[in-house]
Structures are given as structure tokens and as C-alpha cells.
Amino acid sequence: MSNRRLVHCLVFALAALCGAGSVAASDQAPAVMVDEFSYLDTSGEPADQTAAHQRRLQTFVTALKRDVAADARLRLVSPSCAPACPGDASPDDRLRMAAAAGAGIVITGGVQKLSTLVQWARAAAIDVASHRVLFDKVFTFRGDSDEAWERAELFVSRQVRDALAPEPIRLVLLPFELDDTSAGAALGETETDRKSLQAATDAVRQLLQQSARYRLVDNVGERSPEQPMRTCEDCEARAARALGAQQSLFGIVRRIGRTEYIIGFRVRQADTGALIAAGDSGLRLGANESWSRGAVRLVRERLLESGGAER
């Protein structure tokens, strides 16, 4: 079998109709199934090394699964037939197994031994729903020992995982502020108001910390009612830049009456100050204690689940 033909055979069965693409941003860690890899020896060496190659290939795939499972940016899933899935399953059946397991992505590929010291490893990642090729690359590694295979797996694994799960966006969460337009606004913020705003900020922070999309940058500053962020033209972006963040998220509670309020948020790009995502809850009824629940629901639905912010 020619090298060119092998390149096709390793992934063509699963991706014949696919074009190269990129992974869409998602708040949830992508569910990934690692398919079995194939092996082909075209080195022409007289010794039968089938048993050793199959053992090393199994170790390679097991290590790849372990790496995916340990990567917080990804979520490893396995088909219900594992570990005894039929090796001769058709490409369509393999994709159906992946879909049934809840996988959004299948990692597949193979290894070819070209000569005594040179081997190829090819890895590809296929989007289960669209059949698009998300990643497809051939790697060359030298040696045919356990150590050589281990080094190859570490390198291939890192390349594939980084391609499927880009680094999270560095985000600074700015403290929520109160914009009081109620009849009692002249009384100013109460201690209860301040505690409720802090609770809303903390609740959103906890939500964002669980997101694979963002990495929160510590904000050591405190709320400054004398200089509210909401009235400053570029304070959000400047604060984000000062902290080394790529984006900022700022929340506002607009109080209409003692039990009527609207929660809003906006996300800005640090380098340009451009508004890239925003949302509000509409008019809500409830005491201060409900602000944190409303803030979490709003950010989850309008930012995380909708994919509203872009890198």
C-alpha cells in the first residue's frame, strides 16, 4: 500500500465527505470518543512484529483516552459496547456508536511503519453531527520501541487536544452595581443592597469558573460607589487591560421599585472596548435575595448557552 493511499485509509472512511474546519466555541466541554487506531507495517523487515505492534498500539490508544479524560477542556465518552466493540464496524456504525454515546467528536487515526527507524502517525478529529474534519495531521516519529511510541503519543495527544479545545478567554468579572431609579433612590445604597450585589457577583463568578470558555482573572479592586463603572466611558476595558484580561464582564441591577428590578450585563473586548455581548432579564419581581439567582440565570442563558461572546 502506498504512503498516499495510507494517508487516505486512516481517516477517509469516516471523513470522505468532509472538509477541514474549526471547532465552534462552546461553554460545555466537548464530548469526545477516541476510536481504535489502525496499524500498517510497510517496512519490509523479515521479523514478524505483529504482537509487539498491537501491544504498543493499544497502549498508545489507552494513553490517548487517559489524556482526553484528564483534560478539563474535554469530556471523554465511551460507546456502550466498550471495551469489546466490533473491530470491523463500518464507518457509519462507528459514527452511530459515537452519537449514541453522546460524543460530539471522534478522534481516529493510525500508525504506519515505513522503515526500521521511521514511522508515521496520523490523527484526525471528526465532528459527529456534520461529519466535518476538525483536525487532520500526519506526524513522523523515529524508533519502534516503547519509549518512542510513548513520546509520539504525548506529542500527538497534545496537538489534537489543543486543536479541539483552544485556551479559554481571560475574563475579568467586574463587581455588579446598582442603578437605582426607584422612588427611594435618594436614600442611597443600604448594607442589604451591597450584600446582595456582592452575592450576585459571587454567584456569577462561580458560574464562570465552571465554564470551559473562560479563565477568570483576579480582580483585586473593590466597588467604588463614588465612581460607578456604569457611568464611565471606557473604565471596563481599561480595568481589563490593566489586569491582563482579554475581556470584561460587568453587571448592573436596575431597581425600578422596591421589589421590581432588571438585571443586565455586558461583555467588552479589552483591547478595543467594543461591546461583544449584552443581555438583560426584563422586568422581574422579587426582593434583593433574588438578584443572584437572576444574574446566574441571565449569564448562563444569554452568554454561556447562546455562545454570545467571541474571542
Image (cartoon, rainbow, N blue to C red):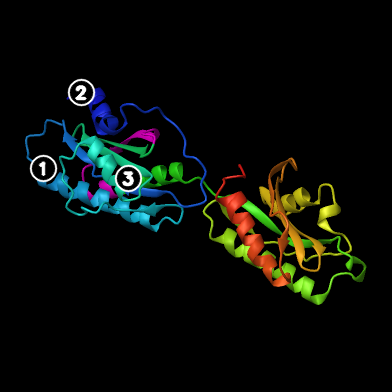
How many numbered discs? 3
SS at mark 3 in the image: helix
Q: Quadrant of residue 264?
A: bottom right
Relative horizontal placement of residue 5, taking residue 162 as reference (left or right)? left
Choose the circle earlier in sequence order: 2 or 3: 2
Residue 99, numbered label: 3
Q: Which residue is mark 2?
A: 2
Q: In percent of the image, x 62 and y 50: which residue is there?
A: 302
Q: In percent of the image, x 74 and y 67: which residue is there?
A: 197
The residue type indicated by label 2 comes to Ser
Answer few, some or many: residues within 10 Å of disc 2's Cα (few below 14, many 20 plus, some between 14 and 19): few
Residue 65, numbered label: none
Q: Check the picture and name the quadrant holding the N terminus.
A: top left
Residue mark closest to the camera, 1 vs 3: 3
> x, y percentage for residue 163?
45, 41
Work out whether 17 lies above or below 151.
above
> x, y percentage for residue 31?
39, 50
Q: Are marks 1 and 3 in contact (CB under 8 Å)?
A: no
The residue type indicated by label 1 comes to Thr
Work out whether 143 lies above or below 257.
above
The residue type indicated by label 3 comes to Ala
The residues tagged by marks 2 and 1 sit, at their Cα atoms, a distance apart of 20 Å
The residues tagged by marks 1 and 3 sit, at their Cα atoms, a distance apart of 32 Å
Relative horizontal placement of residue 86, taking residue 290 as reference (left or right)? left
Looking at the rendering, the stretch of residues picked out in magenta corresponds to: 130-150
Q: Which residue is mark 1?
A: 50
Choose the circle earlier in sequence order: 1 or 3: 1
Q: In percent of the image, x 68 and y 68: which residue is there?
A: 290
